[in-house]
Image: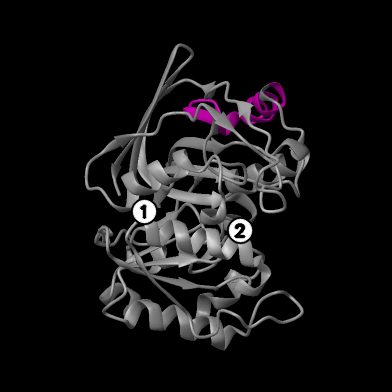
């Protein structure tokens, strides 16, 4: 993919207008309580909210037609009153949209779009086709979390509302519980901090997100390219260590992998049974990773809290056993 001019969308100000759309699964999936909690949090913050026209449609895949999802996506970018866009939730099918997106329309109406998980596919595609920074961070549904959301909010603000560089520091605690089922019965785990897999310094532009969704772009015109990149990777509870190994190996086989300057790996869900030792073993078997600085157990992915990261933006980091610093320098 050619290196095009980076387009940095305007930051959202308090009082701004946020449009919620469902490019993956439907708003109907969310409980009334979660919806109310998310709406209250955004309104308390001073934002005005509106919702895509087709956001409540739901088929047998808990999603809606390509035409409905594309209409809401285009409408959100075209509407001059909308300052930023939040996706409802993740799922499996946002890569169905890629050939129908009007990338020219998006490039001419840049604005923040944020979500994670399956949103990885179209976030990287939009960045690849337009040069516009997209954001992997909280969904609208994430904002329905009553307790333990402070870190996620802080780094969403730093990335999407403020101009200055910032350091991504580890959260004090994390959770991997079905919080949306019982908001008051929560389990918080003390965070042991970053895992240094390979030490060194790196800087580059951010690509990646959810590994399987990112890998679904391989060999297509939507692949953002790895030249001069910081690769960010995370996975969910559907995988285990051998399956993560397969995803990582698949990226290493890309013809432009030699362009990767550093790798950040998000925290694994408990169900994956990934440990620091197992991950180190996976990384050490791959000769191509030998000289690439790698930090794991970073606060992004399918556990909470989650930081917001700028796809197409710039990150620099240094990794050593006694000190890690991750700095977001363009967002």
What residue did someone put label 2 on? Answer: 213
Q: Is residue 109 magenta?
A: no
| Dot 2 crowding, Cα within 10 Å, few <14, some 14–19, many 20+ | many
* Residue at screen point 39% across, 33% down: 168
| Dot 1 crowding, Cα within 10 Å, few <14, some 14–19, many 20+ | many
Q: Is residue 107 above or below residue 211?
A: below
The answer to which image quadrant residue 81 occupies is: bottom left
Q: Rounded to the nearest whole Å, what is the CA distance between mark 1 and mark 2?
A: 16 Å
Q: Position of residue 88 (x, y in %)?
A: 55, 66
Q: Is residue 292 magenta?
A: yes
- Colouring rule applied to residues: one colour
Q: Position of residue 78 (x, y in %)?
A: 32, 82
Q: Secondary structure at mark 2?
A: helix
Query: Depth check: 136 or 174 in front?
Result: 174
Query: Depth check: 26 or 40 in front?
Result: 40
Q: Position of residue 185 (x, y in %)?
A: 70, 41
Left or right of 324, for residue 78? left
What residue did someone put label 1 on? Answer: 312
Please state, as top left, top right, bottom left or bottom right, where the N terminus lies in the image: bottom left
Q: Secondary structure at mark 1?
A: loop
Which mark, residue 190?
none
Residue numbers of the magenta segment: 277-296
* Residue at screen point 46% across, 40% down: 150
The answer to which image quadrant residue 35 occupies is: bottom right
Q: Is residue 85 above or below residue 282?
A: below
* Residue at screen point 66% across, 24% down: 276
N-term mark: 1 or 2: 2
Left or right of 30, for residue 313? left
Q: Position of residue 315 (x, y in %)?
A: 35, 39
Left or right of 189, for residue 115? left
Q: Is residue 219 visible?
A: no
């Amino acid at each position: 993919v050619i290196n095009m001019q980076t387009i940095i969308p305007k930051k959202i100000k308090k009082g701004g207008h946020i449009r919620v759309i469902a490019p993956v699964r439907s708003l109907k999936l969310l409980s009334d309580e979660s919806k109310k909690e998310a709406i209250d949090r955004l309104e308390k913050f001073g934002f005005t909210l509106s919702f895509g026209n087709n956001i409540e449609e739901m088929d047998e895949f808990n999603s809606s037609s390509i035409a409905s999802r594309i209409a809401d996506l285009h409408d959100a970018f075209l509407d001059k009153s909308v300052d930023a866009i939040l996706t409802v939730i993740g799922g499996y099918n946002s890569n169905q949209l890629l050939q129908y997106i009007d990338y020219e329309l998006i490039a001419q109406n840049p604005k923040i779009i944020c979500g994670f998980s399956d949103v990885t596919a179209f976030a990287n595609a939009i960045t690849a086709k337009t040069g516009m920074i997209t954001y992997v961070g909280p969904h609208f549904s994430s904002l329905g979390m009553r307790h333990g959301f402070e870190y996620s909010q802080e780094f969403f603000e730093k990335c999407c509302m403020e101009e200055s560089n910032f350091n991504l520091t580890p959260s004090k605690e994390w959770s991997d519980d079905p919080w949306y089922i019982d908001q008051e019965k929560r389990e918080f785990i003390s965070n042991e901090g970053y895992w240094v897999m390979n030490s060194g310094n790196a800087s580059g532009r951010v690509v990646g997100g959810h590994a399987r969704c990112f890998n679904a772009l391989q060999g297509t015109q939507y692949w953002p390219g790895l030249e001069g990149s910081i690769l960010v990777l995370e996975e969910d509870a559907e995988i285990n260590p051998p399956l993560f190994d397969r995803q990582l190996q698949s990226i290493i086989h890309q013809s432009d992998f030699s362009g990767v300057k550093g790798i950040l790996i998000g925290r694994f869900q408990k169900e994956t049974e990934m440990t620091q030792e197992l991950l180190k073993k996976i990384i050490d078997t791959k000769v191509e990773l030998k000289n690439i600085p790698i930090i794991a157990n970073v606060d992004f992915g399918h556990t909470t809290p989650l930081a917001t990261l700028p796809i197409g933006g710039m990150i620099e980091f240094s990794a050593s056993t006694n000190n890690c610093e991750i700095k977001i320098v363009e967002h």
